[in-house]
Image: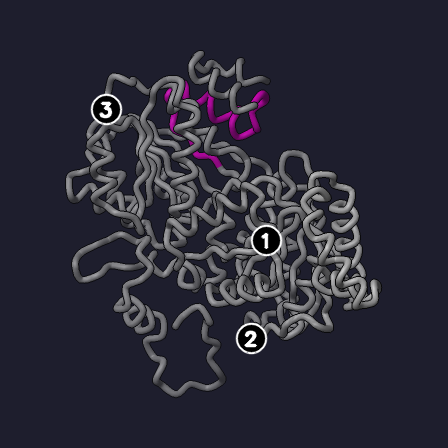
Amino acid sequence: MKFTELGLSADILSAVVKAGFETPTPIQEQTITLALEGKDVIGQAQTGTGKTAAFGLPTLDKIDVNGGLQALVIAPTRELAVQSQEELFRFGRDKGIKVRSVFGGASIEKQIKALKSGAHVVVGTPGRMVDLIKRRALQLGDIETLILDEADEMLNMGFIDDLEFIIKATPAARQTLLFSATMPDAIKKIGVKFMKDPQHIKIVSKEMTSDLIDQYYIKTKEFEKFDILTRLLDVQKPELAIVFGRTKRRVDELTRGLKLLGYRAEGIHGDLAQQKRLAVLRDFKNDNLDVLVATDVAARGLDISGVTHVYNYDITQDQESYVHRIGRTGRAGKAGLSITFVSNNEMGYLRAIERLTKKDMTGMKPPTKEEAYYASLAVAFDEIKRDLTNPKLAAKLDKFDADAEKLLAEYDAKLLVSLLLQAKVNDPDTRPKVDIAAEKPLPFNGEGGRGGSRGGNRNRGRNDRRGGYNRDRRGSRDRDDRHKKDYYKKDKQKVHPKATEKKPGFVIRNKGDK
């Protein structure tokens, strides 16, 4: 089936054609038809299957540009909200649809001003939407379509109360589209409570992990990880790579270490200012970076194409998160590769991931220092040969002729060339020493942890989304604000209410909590 057969209007189809889309994905094909008929839909599919177009195209198709706010999209993170807003704007531009985004970490006054200037569709995070509703800056009385994107992620981040608050502020006669990678009981209850005879679309599990992704693991000790990572980067030469770390501190240290060694790398996590996060993602998408180091905040909802390699520097305790991590590669029919570092104690988690994905990972022997050196040397040779045969560059080098003659007269030519190679080759014997602070492995569990996103890593949100639970004394419910100090005190009391009591055994503390 083609997009032209789905019943979309001409102005929406023109935008689809401009975007280069021809054939809808399974979630798009099934959702668009039902949504155009006005039915409520629950779509179960992972990130990267085209959900934004699945709910966006039929929603935009029904928008009356002469009216006011008619559609609301709720997303778990700022990045996903911005991305969805950009995508919806692109599809609705020919029709003249105004799409606004609202989220924490940015000026609420500017967002209120933008809403006052007019909006047909608003995309945003739950906490900021609640603030705007309470300020009467976001009026939902005329909402015809409500979309909940990545509903299970919003549940994990503690947004369930805010979701219910927002839903109750919309008309009961609205159409509701809910999308979730998994379908826990709490999400099902939302469907029962707030949706009218929803049609359930489920993308079968075989589509959750691409057959085009080669999955490997390397058994390694904590102190060996960084050297192995850099050797892999030198030997495999990824076009675009994402390195996943478990905590924000880990991401910062890995980014600093990679940049020190000359890799074009930047990091992204929840504590970065919104402007910086968007700038990093823009550079990565525009090929200004080779390596993106990220916490799981980047694993959900970010449409980053062209990623060839995913390195799981820290294995995830939540098997669903692994699926979303490696889903950044192996897209659009292209092959991808993922490598997971794992300690002996963490092998149970790896086996649990294999059971979920129904695909065994292959053990890999890490490259040696010599292999990494010769790989880097080969790259240096290629670069030098390319530059020497570039007429434009050769013309620019003419001004150095006299100085080059002086050096050749004073020093051995082989010595000068060796100096040039030393500057270009990533030699493991001479490069700066990089110290990465050790993180404790996941608690040993021969069965692979608690499994799934429901009972797995209960500290997952606190590692990278501390603002997900914040309610400060001023009454702000903006859960994207990750910088309020009094939250951390409350959270520690809540998570470890008996931390001062003597207990048998030992306590494993999450490195993400401070």
- For marks 2 and 1, the one nearer the N-term is 1
Quadrant of the snapshot with the C terminus: bottom left
Tell me: residue 491, above or below residue 328: below
The front one of 372 and 62 is: 372
> What residue is at 71 percent from the left and 58 percent from the top?
403
Quarter of the figure with residue 409: bottom right
Left/right placement of residue 183 relative to residue 128 reads right
Q: Where is residue 390 in the image (x, y as percent from the top left)?
A: 74, 41
The front one of 154 and 18 is: 18
Q: Where is residue 307 in the image (x, y as percent from the top left)?
A: 62, 45
- Spatial CA distance of label 2 from label 1 is 21 Å
Residue type at mark 1: give it: Val
Q: Does the magenta stretch include residue 284?
A: no
Left/right placement of residue 83 relative to residue 192 reads right
- Tell me the magenta residue range: 21-43
Name the residue tied to disc 1.
291
Left/right placement of residue 441 relative to residue 43 reads right
Q: Is residue 351 visible?
A: yes
| Callout in the foreground (1, 3) | 1
Q: Where is residue 252 in the image (x, y as percent from the top left)?
A: 49, 64
Q: Is residue 365 visible?
A: no
Name the residue tied to disc 3.
68
In the picture, the disc for residue 438 is 2
| Callout in the foreground (2, 1) | 1
- For marks 3 and 2, the one nearer the N-term is 3
